[in-house]
Image (spheres, rainbow, N blue to C red):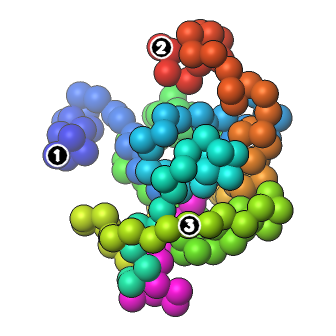
Amino acid sequence: MVERILDDFGRADALQSIVLRYFNASGADPDGEIGEQRDAKITRLVPRALMAIQGQISDFEVYGTDYDTTDGTAIRDYIHVSDLAEAYVQALRRLLRGGGGGTFNLGTGRGYSVRQVLDAIAAETGQPLPAATGPRREGDPPVLIADATLARTELGFVPRLSELKSIIRTAYAWHGRPHSKRKVGDRRLDPDSP
């Protein structure tokens, strides 16, 4: 509904806006300055799997292994956070040039199954991830892959770091650094601070 409202404002020349719909944002800054440290209740696959490998959580499980996919696990499109940051810059440039608004999917157009992601994490870390299996989460589709054609043609969006190996490598480097165990309250490093 919000996208429709923004589109209506744009058609009335009252407000130009760009909506970026991104798929599974993953990875960390390649320079190691910024990464994702979440609380143990998160369900995002990559950080949760890395937290399990590091012993930060003990209840890691795969949600559903009976999907109609090659290996029975859900398939998702993963996009590196650095590619998302670049897309924001491209979107702002478009607005500043008067290029108009729009709604754009940000992804790679390629999906990886949960099992493929876990295998990639095991290969990168050298540690297999024993994963219990649980039921599917309600409402999860078997396959969810972005069609980013419009973002590519109108924003010039081209993911450069969104190969699965790069996502896992940068996320693992971030999670393995001492700052991933930093004290909450350090405003400079605390991801939950405003």
Q: Nearer the viewer, residue 184 or 70?
A: 184
Q: Mark 1 belongs to which amino acid? A: Met
Q: Is residue 84 left or right of residue 119?
A: left
Q: Report if residue 75 lies within the magenta region.
A: yes
N-terminal of the two: label 1 or label 3? 1
Q: Is residue 194 left or right of residue 116?
A: left
Q: Which residue is painted at 48% across and 39% down in the image?
A: 40
Q: Mark 2 belongs to which amino acid? A: Pro
Q: Is residue 151 left or right of residue 21?
A: right
Q: Check contact, mark 1 vs mark 3: CB within 8 A.
A: no
- Label 2 or label 1, whichever lies nearer to me, is 2
Q: Which residue is painted at 51% across and 56% down in the image?
A: 60
Residue matched to label 1: 1
**Is disc 2 placed on a helix, strand or loop?**
loop
Give me the C-alpha separation between circle 1 and circle 3: 38 Å
Q: Which residue is painted at 53% across and 86% down in the image?
A: 71
**Residue 27 seen in the figure:** no
Question: Residue 95: x and y, percent?
Answer: 47, 34
N-terminal of the two: label 3 or label 2? 3
Q: Report if residue 45 lies within the magenta region.
A: no
Residue matched to label 3: 131
Q: Residues within 10 Å of mark 1 (few under 14, many from 20)?
A: few
Q: Which residues are magenta?
A: 68-81
- Label 3 or label 2, whichever lies nearer to me, is 3
Residue matched to label 2: 194
Q: Which residue is painted at 79% across and 33% down in the image?
A: 177
Give me the C-alpha separation between circle 3 and circle 2: 34 Å
Q: Which mark is residue 166?
A: none
Q: Nearer the viewer, residue 88 or 176?
A: 176
Q: Check contact, mark 3 vs mark 2: CB within 8 A.
A: no
